[in-house]
Image (cartoon, coloured by chain):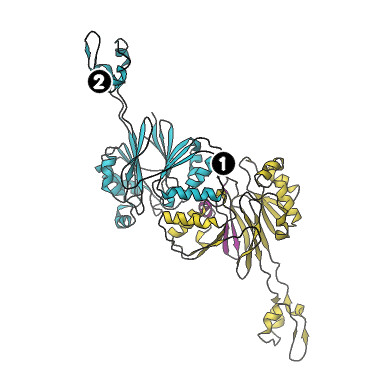
Chain colours: A cyan, B yellow
Amino acid sequence: MTFKVTILGSNSAIPTIKRNPTSQLVNHNERLFLIDCAEGTQLQLRKYRIRMQRIGHIFISHLHGDHFFGLIGLISSMHLLGRKKELHIYGPGPLENILKVQLEASQTELVYPLHFHPIKEGSSELIYENDRLEVVTIPLNHRIPTSGFLFREKTSKRKLIKDVVKNMDIPSDMFAKIKDGADFTDASGKLYKNEEMTTAPPKSRSYAYCSDTSYFEPVIPIIYKTDLLYHEATFMQDRADAAAEKFHATTVEAATIAKKSEVNKLIIGHFSTRYDDEEPLLKEAREVFQNTDIATEGKSFSI
Amino acid sequence: MTFKVTILGSNSAIPTIKRNPTSQLVNHNERLFLIDCAEGTQLQLRKYRIRMQRIGHIFISHLHGDHFFGLIGLISSMHLLGRKKELHIYGPGPLENILKVQLEASQTELVYPLHFHPIKEGSSELIYENDRLEVVTIPLNHRIPTSGFLFREKTSKRKLIKDVVKNMDIPSDMFAKIKDGADFTDASGKLYKNEEMTTAPPKSRSYAYCSDTSYFEPVIPIIYKTDLLYHEATFMQDRADAAAEKFHATTVEAATIAKKSEVNKLIIGHFSTRYDDEEPLLKEAREVFQNTDIATEGKSFSI
């Protein structure tokens, strides 16, 4: 089952010719989710051949422009291109009015249903779920209210071993119980242990998005043992003071969070425009947490 | 004295990889003015090496997204890059609140003075002037309140012929009158006709921007004999009905306005994304008005 993250942009603050500001696409089981939506995101979607109308849910971490100025344009293009499918947006409360005043000014009545879900900042909350996936918020520490997002697969049930169970006379109402781990005694009184009939489900996978934030240890229990973590690393460690003052993190801080959270892999991004070359940032992070990569535009990370 | 228009984008409705939506830069006497500001405009400025901080005045024609969604991003980048110079924005009234709610949401207090000037739609008004240039609005006919802009040089004074006047004993208070066309009689009673002492000033030049609008003859007296006219031409003539219904113009209609207004040159743009090839649009317009060109991104038109 597909579970991958595609980087659409990872620059901080300002769009440049080389790097777009933040946006990411999460594909889970061919359902598409967008995280943040900087100016230019709709063009990035075109560039990487992702059909915008397939996106069903958009999550906005906070209301700094480099994370949401492209949202109204994306919503409008979906409208102009005749979208029918509903769209769900999760973000800070004031975002609803920001969208509303702009749609009103152009006298636009969207041709598709748009549902806005305000995020309650400050605690980790379940904000979305389907049959296989749930999304919970990760409270972050930034200058304005900010939430990260944890995409976590639901624990799936054990799988029946067909060759074994097909010869057993199991009542239909027992299948669900066996998938949940129950043993089974047949009509003759013979006991079948669950592990004879089933195999363990695949491990539930998860992806955590933490941006923007200063070094903030309260995220650790929420993202503990996550498979893939994106953590902002606006500055190198020599600018740790500037980072703290601006509620941003350094390479070493991002890597330390990854290490303490025992995640499998770390991606760093949201680099300050002062860094043309990303290699020194990567090198510095890897000294603390080896399995680190750069959030390069257009790159996909499979989980 | 410089007077030129640079096309930053001229697509309609939606940004595409090939064509950005509307924005233009007017350089008059090295003062920079921006007309409309679609999503991505700040990147277009970078691409064409125009320093955003040199822009002093921004004119927004109307509140459809393809004409202003890039404004908040541009304003924010000017802030993040430490602008000091004041910025003036002229646009429909609701734009002020649209900017305000977004700046408030990010708790941004701009580090430079921003002055918003609401446009009174429906009549042609002087909205800006300096010592050499004035800008007046051009009421247009679109689905929502829309104004075009006429950039018109002020009539300059006659120029003194230095070799002639240096040998004459002219009192200092007379120079201004002579530049205005007065004759001069010296102490001995000798009369100098004005045309002996001065040459005619250069012709005042003008640029008219008309987008978005349907075919709308009331613009003609306002833009009469303008040197350069940009007029939207969203559709070819075979879609004249669709154009009228959507309050847009066709190639032939744009050219007809140019012809009836006796302008010197016409630029057409704001093409529907349905047209990949722009040549047929140009050809159709030129059949009505020969001196027509395409608003190609990155191209500058000197007046």
| Mark 2 residue type | Ala
Q: Quadrant of residue B217?
A: bottom right
Image coordinates for residue A118, horizontal then vertical, percent: 40, 45
In this view, B5 is above or below A191: below
Image coordinates for residue A72, horizontal then vertical, percent: 49, 47
Give the chain letter at badge 2: A
- Which residue does the numbered mark 1 point to in the structure image? A80
Q: Which residues are magenta?
A: B19-48
Image coordinates for residue A88, horizontal then vertical, percent: 44, 39
Q: Viewer-nearest of labels 1 and 2?
A: 2
- In what element is the residue under mark 1? helix
| Mark 1 residue type | Leu
- Which residue does the numbered mark 2 point to in the structure image? A182
Q: Is residue A18 visible?
A: no
Q: Quadrant of residue A173?
A: top left
Image coordinates for residue B83, horizontal then vertical, percent: 46, 63
Residue at 53 percent of width and 48 percent of height: A103
In this view, A191 is above or below B197: above
Q: Residues within 10 Å of mark 1 (few under 14, many from 20)?
A: some
Q: Does A94 sit left or right of B130 as displayed?
A: left
Q: Residues within 10 Å of mark 2 (few under 14, many from 20)?
A: some
Work out which quarter of the rendered image holds the N terminus of chain A and state it: top left
Give the chain letter at badge 1: A
